[in-house]
Amino acid sequence: MTWTVTPEPFNSPDAYALRRSYYDEVASRYWKRPATEEEIDAGLAGDGVEQLSCPTGEFLVGRHEGRPASCGGVLLLDPATAELTRVYTRPGRRGTGGGKLLLAGLEDAARQLGAGRMVLNTRLDLIEARGLYVRQGYREIPAYTTGPYMEVWYGKDL
């Protein structure tokens, strides 16, 4: 099974569809019920995704067998530190190596932006993502930011 990961504008049709799927899953898990289309629209509105383009960041799309299946962004927090954000793999494609490849691409993008450290925040219920991060060398760190959907923080030197 073939995976490719490449930079793509955050608002391309494939990237937008993946971002909607990401928000649908994380919101539905949080609320313990299916998110409505209106809630997904509201969650995506004004979410700062435009920062995930040069010079402040990058957005990547992963394709499995040529079909869009994963995405993620990297955002510079300061000249030396980048943050992983909106990391998502479609449920039917998890466990096929795409997450590892996506993280490697995001780490490369962070290095190209000048970062030497990557950080991220997530929720405790996002078990699949947390497992991926730990398998790829991320370790729990003290909170570097706060917010309503942040329960655990990870970091890794690049």
Image (tube, helix red, strand yellow):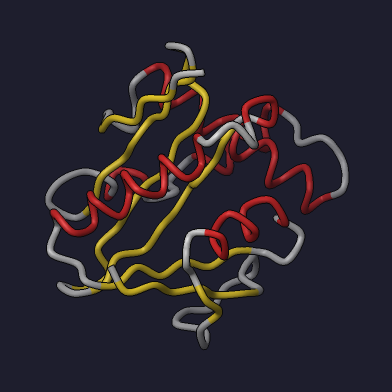
The relative height of residue 14 versus residue 115 in the rendered view (above or below) is above
Q: In screen coordinates, is 138 left or right of 41?
A: left
Residue at 57%, 65% (x, y): give it.
134
Q: Position of residue 30 (x, y in %)?
A: 77, 53
Residue at 47%, 12% (x, y): give it.
65
Q: Residue 62's quadrant in the figure?
A: top left
Between 41 and 69, the one lying in front of the other is 69
Q: Position of residue 151 (x, y in %)?
A: 66, 74
The relative height of residue 95 versus residue 11 in the rendered view (above or below) is below
Q: Residue furthest top?
A: 66
Dividing the image into 4 quarters, which one contains the C terminus?
Answer: bottom left
Q: Residue 117's quadrant in the figure?
A: bottom left
Q: Residue furthest bottom?
A: 142
Q: Position of residue 3 (x, y in %)?
A: 43, 24
Looking at the rendered structure, the number of numbered marks drawn on it comes to: 0
The relative height of residue 48 versus residue 42 in the rendered view (above or below) is below
Q: Position of residue 142 (x, y in %)?
A: 52, 88
Between 151 and 135, the one lying in front of the other is 135
Q: In screen coordinates, is 76 left or right of 87?
A: left
Between 31 and 144, the one lying in front of the other is 144
Residue at 59%, 64% (x, y): give it.
122
The relative height of residue 38 versus residue 114 in the rendered view (above or below) is above
